[in-house]
Image (cartoon, grey):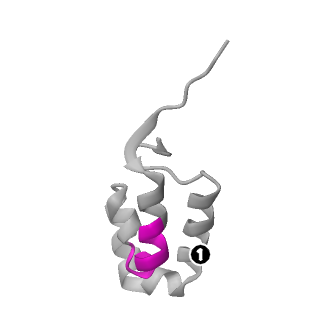
Amino acid sequence: MTTTTATTSKSWLVTLLLCFFLGALGVHRFYVGKIGTGILMLITFGGLGLWVLIDFIMILIGKFSDKQGQALAK
């Protein structure tokens, strides 16, 4: 029995780079469709950097998903 994981059309690499360079503005969250949390990141400057660091690590290990919960395309 094999299981397949649905992946989104959003790129893992693009999301990682957006998080690294513009993470405090929440641009990577807007990119994957998470508008609400993107606005919160924009207002709080990425949770003063902590939220950005957590997102960056989650993207690196492949646990970050888009709005529908689908994995990012590698």
Which residue corresponds to the image point at 41% horizontal and 60% vertical from the top-left? 14
Q: Quadrant of the N terminus?
A: top right
The x and y percentages for residue 15 are 44, 61
Q: In this view, does 33 lie to the left or right of 18?
A: left
**In this picture, which residue range is highlighted in magenta?**
17-26
The x and y percentages for residue 26 are 39, 73
Which residue corresponds to the image point at 59% horizontal and 80% vertical from the top-left? 50
| Number of numbered labels in the structure image | 1
Q: Is residue 39 magenta?
A: no
Q: Is residue 3 left or right of residue 15?
A: right
The x and y percentages for residue 40 are 39, 75
Say which element carries label 1: helix
In this rendering, is residue 46 above or below 12?
A: below
The x and y percentages for residue 39 are 33, 73
Which residue lies under the disc numbered 1?
53
Q: Which amino acid type is marked by label 1? A: Leu
In this rendering, is residue 27 above or below 45?
A: above
Q: Is residue 67 visible?
A: no
Q: Does the magenta stretch include residue 18?
A: yes
* Residue 3 location, quadrant: top right
Which residue corresponds to the image point at 40% horizontal and 41% vertical from the top-left? 8
In this rendering, is residue 52 above or below 44?
A: above
User: Is the stretch drawn in magenta largely helix, strand or loop?
Assistant: helix
Q: How crowded is mark 1: few (under 14 residues within 10 Å), some or many (20 or more)?
A: some
* Residue 24 location, quadrant: bottom left
Q: Can residue 32 be seen in this view?
A: yes
